[in-house]
Image (cartoon, rainbow, N blue to C red):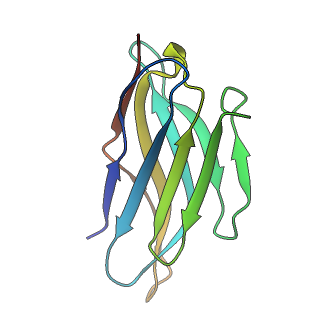
Amino acid sequence: QVQFVESGGGLVQPGGSLRLSCAVSGNGIRVNIMHWYRQAPGKQRELVATISPSGTTNYADAAKGRFTISRDNAKNTVYLQLNDLAPEDTAAYYCNADVAAIASGTLVNYWGKGTQVTVSS
């Protein structure tokens, strides 16, 4: 069974920082591309950042210059460093990844349960 464990969310003041993490666990798996999404109340879920297994990254315009996605392939963990946070960044942040079963090569997309980021004075 593949499991995502997300952490790092919390309440911060505007201008503050948080570091989110998402660890993927499971037997006989290989984690492919990984993403961070977010969903604010009353809004649709949106893609924030993407990172390939080799470390190639892409960011939403709202994230560029403030957020950094990274990964540790040995730990099957993806991170999202959130800097200069604003109230508009308040949302549930979700880890998402394509995970392959090594034996079969079957690729399945998984979602984490989300971690809440709240930016408020």
Residue found at the far bottom of this picture: 103
Quarter of the rendering containing residue 46: top right
Classify 8 as above or below 4: above
Classify 83 as above or below 51: above
User: Which residue is depicted at the point 49% across and 78% down?
Assistant: 74
Q: Is residue 42 left or right of residue 32?
A: left
Residue 120, horizontal then vertical, whole percent: 41, 13
Quarter of the rendering containing residue 12: top left
Nearest the viewer among 37 and 21 is: 21
Split into 4 quadrants, where in the image is the C terminus?
Answer: top left
User: Which residue is depicted at the point 49% across and 14% down?
Assistant: 87
Q: Is residue 6 left or right of residue 69?
A: left
User: Which residue is depicted at the point 74% across and 60% down?
Assistant: 56
Classify 10 as above or below 86: below
Classify 101 as above or below 17: below
Residue 21, horizontal then vertical, whole percent: 43, 52
The total of numbered circles placed on residues is 0
Residue 104, horizontal then vertical, whole percent: 45, 85
Split into 4 quadrants, where in the image is the N terminus?
Answer: bottom left
Residue 29, horizontal then vertical, whole percent: 42, 79
User: Which residue is depicted at the point 34% across and 50% down?
Assistant: 6
Quarter of the rendering containing residue 22: bottom left
Q: Is residue 11 left or right of residue 95?
A: left
